[in-house]
Amino acid sequence: MEKDRIHKLTLLALMIALDVVLSPLMRIEGMAPMSSVMNIIAGVLLGPFYGTMMALVCALIRMTMLGIPPLALTGAVFGAFFAGLFYKFGRKLVWSMVGEIFGTGILGSLLSYPVMVWFTGSQQELYWLIYTPRFIGATLIGSAIAFVVLVKLKETKIFKRWQRLFFEGRRFE
């Protein structure tokens, strides 16, 4: 079982590296669709716990190294958790996408308001739904990209092997 644990941690490190590198490269001002792509892929491959850890570590790296505000935390962490959780129970890619849209697009955007009020120290012209349109837009773009990537990935042997590691024999549909 030590070998399985090493494989899981290796895949987690690979997903963190991909997220940290791809998110700033494919960014629309105020939107991070690649974060949504990686959250959905992590939810399908890694499950809710490891997916959330991936998003948390990536957000912290992006905040410290790239100067991104705490929106990286509120957006990514909830999306990754719900993408993995919804996939775990629904076992279909569409459920992971719905989890990402709910977690990042709705819950993450609403929780971003108090975090940014605290971070900036002011309430100038901010209202609770200020981040929702951009977060939902990013999750919809990211969901579409993730769908294409995962449909292609599911045909590979290594994808099936990785998924067995995290989901104990349950298959991607």
Image (tube, rainbow, N blue to C red):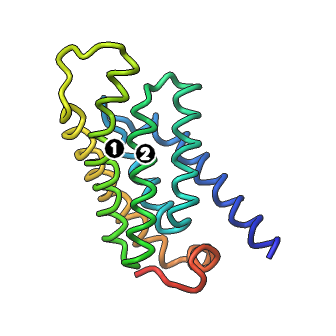
**Residue that appears at 51% across and 60% down:** 42
**Residue that appears at 41% across and 46% down:** 34
Q: Nearer the viewer, residue 115 or 145?
A: 115
Q: Quadrant of the C terminus?
A: bottom left
Q: Secondary structure at mark 2?
A: helix
Q: Quadrant of the N terminus?
A: bottom right
Q: Is residue 57 left or right of residue 121?
A: right
Residue 103, above or below 74: below
Q: Is residue 155 left or right of residue 79?
A: right
Residue 117, above or below 171: above
Q: Quadrant of residue 122?
A: top left
Q: Nearer the viewer, residue 100 or 30?
A: 100
Q: Nearer the viewer, residue 147 or 61?
A: 61
Amino acid carrying label 2: it is Ala
Give the residue number, with chain letter if any, for mark 2: 76
Give the percent coordinates (x, y) of residue 112. Answer: 33, 34
Residue 166, above or below 14: below
Distance between the Cα atoms at labels 2 and 1? 8 Å
